[in-house]
Image (cartoon, rainbow, N blue to C red):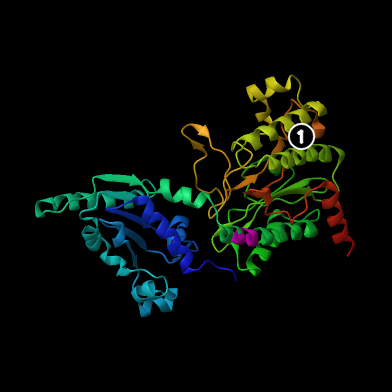
């Protein structure tokens, strides 16, 4: 199993310490435990940015990075976490504890999480700037406010509290936006497993199968490779493919319909994100094929537009023009292409963007604009490219033969100096490839 090492996490902390500057403190908490229902929690997953800096996956933890008066003094990394507790470990599993935080996770200092309120006041003293993730958790915001107030109250003793409170996300999000080679390798593994799952779904689908049964085929591939879904899987047959965030997955798949699957897994905290649309019966109808090829042409052109120096929005502009022209050619839309694009009349059939950042979160962090303008692609960014067309089943403005067809095709693209790198290339997507794969599976 490929994993990041503590040296990788330390390198990230080194960068962060340099970014916050001297006489500063950065505080970052992990995610709280979330209840699913009475006496049952959701399976825990650490906060992505917290894990990005620490590699620590347990709940109830806070990381603190302190810098001092000179660069020569370096910085101190402290980890507040749960203590070892024999009784609780019998019920809920082993903990690293204070010793483990230092020995396994290479913290300079480690404290019981119960001591956070007490110890943090000492660490805040004589710091000029406090960085933390403002607005993520109202309870933690209130807690930080109490710390600052208490630190200010100590000024009569000759100490000072931070005069500035700064959004930590502005630094960490930019760090996470640019992936290094190790991160891309982890995302490639997640993409390969996700591609295997989509291939399995194409092989196993048949009329009468329930959407949730097809979802189970995906989850089996994810699970046997030690992964979990990176988001709620969408398995929408027929009309359901026109619902962008359809996750009920509880209807039968019908002969002659398409099924749209938007599903993928995460590996070692790094996500994949794939969408494929294919015929339940194994063969596209003429109408399905015509619309599908428009979306595919738009996707291929949009992927090619993911180039260093191009605007983030360039793939979307490229995709929209091809989609609109295709709809005009089929008679589904009428009018002037430039007028349709300017007025966004195409949103009747294509109502979302063409992609988003991808990384530890499926909709990953990182600003899309800089100083009000769409930012340009830079090496190491990863973006999804996912154009689609959706003709609602009750849309009486189009010929009935087109209604109820929903199509989206999505791949994960790394920005490189050699051009776009498709991480999810291992799952087929042309009409000919899909029909050949499904025909071969049915022949066995």
Please give left or right for residue 151 compared with residue 428 in the image. left
Q: Is residue 186 magenta?
A: yes
| Above-or-below relation of 80 to 230 | below
Highlighted magenta segment, given as a residue range: 185-190
Whole-percent x and y of residue 381? 57, 48
User: How many neighbours does mark 1 have within 10 angstroms: few (below 14), some (14-19), or many (20 or more)?
Assistant: many
Q: Is residue 319 magenta?
A: no
Whole-percent x and y of residue 133? 37, 49
**Residue sitting nearer the eye, 67 or 81:** 67
Whole-percent x and y of residue 265? 62, 59
Looking at the image, the residue that sits furthest to the left is 156
Who's the residue at 45% across and 63% down the image? 9
Q: Quadrant of the C terminus?
A: bottom right
Q: In this view of the protein, can residue 266 be seen by the observer? A: no
Total marks shown come to 1
Q: Quadrant of the N terminus?
A: bottom right
**Residue sitting nearer the eye, 100 or 394:** 100
Q: In this view of the protein, can residue 12 be seen by the observer? A: yes
| Above-or-below relation of 22 to 51 | above
Residue at the disc numbered 1: 403
Whole-percent x and y of residue 330? 82, 29
| Above-or-below relation of 148 to 218 | above
Looking at the image, the residue that sits furthest to the right is 443
**Residue sitting nearer the eye, 246 or 337:** 337
Query: Magenta region, mostly helix, strand or loop?
Result: helix
């Amino acid at each position: 199993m490929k994993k990041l090492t503590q040296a990788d996490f330390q390198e990230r902390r080194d960068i962060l310490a340099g970014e916050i500057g001297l006489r500063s403190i950065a505080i970052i908490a992990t995610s709280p435990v979330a209840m699913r229902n009475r006496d049952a929690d959701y399976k825990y997953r650490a906060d992505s940015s917290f894990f990005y800096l620490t590699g620590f996956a347990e709940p109830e933890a806070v990381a603190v990075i302190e810098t001092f008066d000179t660069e020569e003094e370096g910085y101190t990394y402290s980890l507040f976490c749960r203590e070892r507790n024999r009784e609780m470990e019998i019920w809920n599993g082993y903990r690293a504890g204070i010793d483990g935080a230092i020995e396994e996770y290479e913290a300079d200092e480690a404290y019981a999480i119960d001591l956070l309120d007490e110890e943090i006041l000492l660490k805040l003293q004589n710091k000029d700037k406090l960085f933390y993730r403002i607005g993520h958790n109202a309870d933690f915001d209130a807690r930080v406010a109490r710390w600052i107030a208490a630190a200010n109250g100590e000024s009569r003793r000759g100490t000072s509290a931070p005069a500035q409170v700064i959004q930590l996300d502005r630094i960490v999000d930019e760090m996470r936006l640019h992936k290094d080679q190790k991160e891309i390798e982890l995302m490639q593994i997640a993409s390969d497993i996700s591609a295997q799952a989509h291939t399995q779904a194409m092989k196993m689908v048949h009329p009468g199968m329930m959407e949730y049964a097809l979802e189970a085929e995906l989850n089996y591939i994810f699970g046997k490779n030690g992964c979990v879904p990176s988001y709620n899987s969408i398995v929408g047959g027929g009309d359901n493919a026109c619902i962008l965030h359809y996750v009920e997955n509880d209807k039968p798949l019908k002969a002659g319909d398409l099924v749209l699957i938007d599903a993928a897994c995460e590996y070692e905290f790094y996500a994949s994100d794939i969408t494929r649309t294919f015929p339940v019966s194994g063969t596209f109808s003429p109408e399905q094929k015509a619309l599908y090829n428009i979306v595919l042409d738009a996707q291929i052109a949009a992927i090619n537009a993911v180039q260093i120096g191009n605007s983030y929005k360039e793939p979307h502009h490229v995709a929209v023009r091809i989609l609109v022209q295709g709809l005009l050619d089929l008679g589904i839309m009428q009018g002037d292409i430039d007028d349709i694009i300017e007025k966004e009349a195409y949103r009747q059939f294509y109502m979302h963007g063409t992609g988003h950042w991808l990384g530890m979160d499926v909709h990953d962090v990182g600003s899309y604009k800089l100083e009000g303008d769409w930012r340009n692609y830079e090496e190491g960014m990863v973006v999804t490219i996912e154009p689609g067309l959706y003709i609602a089943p009750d849309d009486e403005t189009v010929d009935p033969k087109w209604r109820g067809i929903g199509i989206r095709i999505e791949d994960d693209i790394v920005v490189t100096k050699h051009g776009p790198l498709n991480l999810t290339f291992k799952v087929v997507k042309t009409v000919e490839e899909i029909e050949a794969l499904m025909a071969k599976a049915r022949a066995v």
